[in-house]
Image (tube, helix red, strand yellow):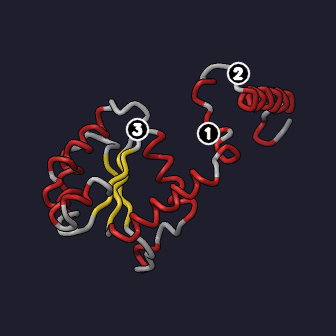
Amino acid sequence: MAAAGVPVSAIEALGRRAGECNRMLEEGTGAGADFLGWVSLPSSVTETELRRVKDAAEKLRAVADVVVVVGIGGSYLGARAVLEALGNPFACLRRERSGPDVVFAGQNISEDYLYDLLEALQGRSVGVIVISKSGTTTEPAIASVSFAASSKDVTERPGRGSASSR
């Protein structure tokens, strides 16, 4: 018997199953194989693509007080996980921010959340990143349309010509 009364044979069986699942991930076989692009992502990113991402990030840092990430599910959670993993989640409490504040929209359909967010962004320079595989998911679509509808406040400050590049 292992800890908590789990038989060693059950643990060994789970270990074998985990190995099989890992093999399926690496080989791209099994259910959901069409959605495994992330497995090879670190080694498949070109220097050119990495430079484009870094350039876009530098541009956002230069022009935005706040970056709004619009997405739901993995799109929202992926961005949030990276921010939490690579940053100090309590830096804002210590006033240690070195770049724009990052907030999220489109992860729910609460009109109160969206209204409060749009109110809080008044008078601030805002960059918006929309993350969506299909572009048809309801929650991010609502947030995107809301930002477009309220863009008068966002676009008048930096100038209409630069708003689309934010």
Q: Is residue 67 left or right of residue 150?
A: right
Residue type highlighted by circle 3:
Ser
The location of residue 104, given as percent across then percent down, is 35, 53
Please give the name of the residue rendered at 28% of the width and 37% of the height, measured from the top-left corner.
141
Q: Are marks 2 and 3 in contact (CB under 8 Å)?
A: no
Q: Is residue 23 left or right of residue 105?
A: right
Taking depth in this image into account, of 134 and 162 the one nearest to the observer is 162
Q: Quadrant of the C terminus?
A: bottom left
Please give the name of the residue rendered at 46% of the width and 66% of the height, measured from the top-left corner.
58
Residue type highlighted by circle 1:
Trp
The location of residue 121, given as percent across then percent down, is 22, 63
Cα gap from disc 3 to disc 1, whole angstroms? 15 Å
Please give the name of the residue rendered at 31% of the width and 49% of the height, measured from the top-left corner.
105
Cα gap from disc 2 to disc 1, whole angstroms? 14 Å
Q: Which mark is residue 132?
A: 3
> Label 2's element?
loop
Q: Which residue carries the number 2 mark? A: 29
Among numbered discs 2 and 3, the one appearing first in the sequence? 2
Q: Which mark is residue 38?
A: 1
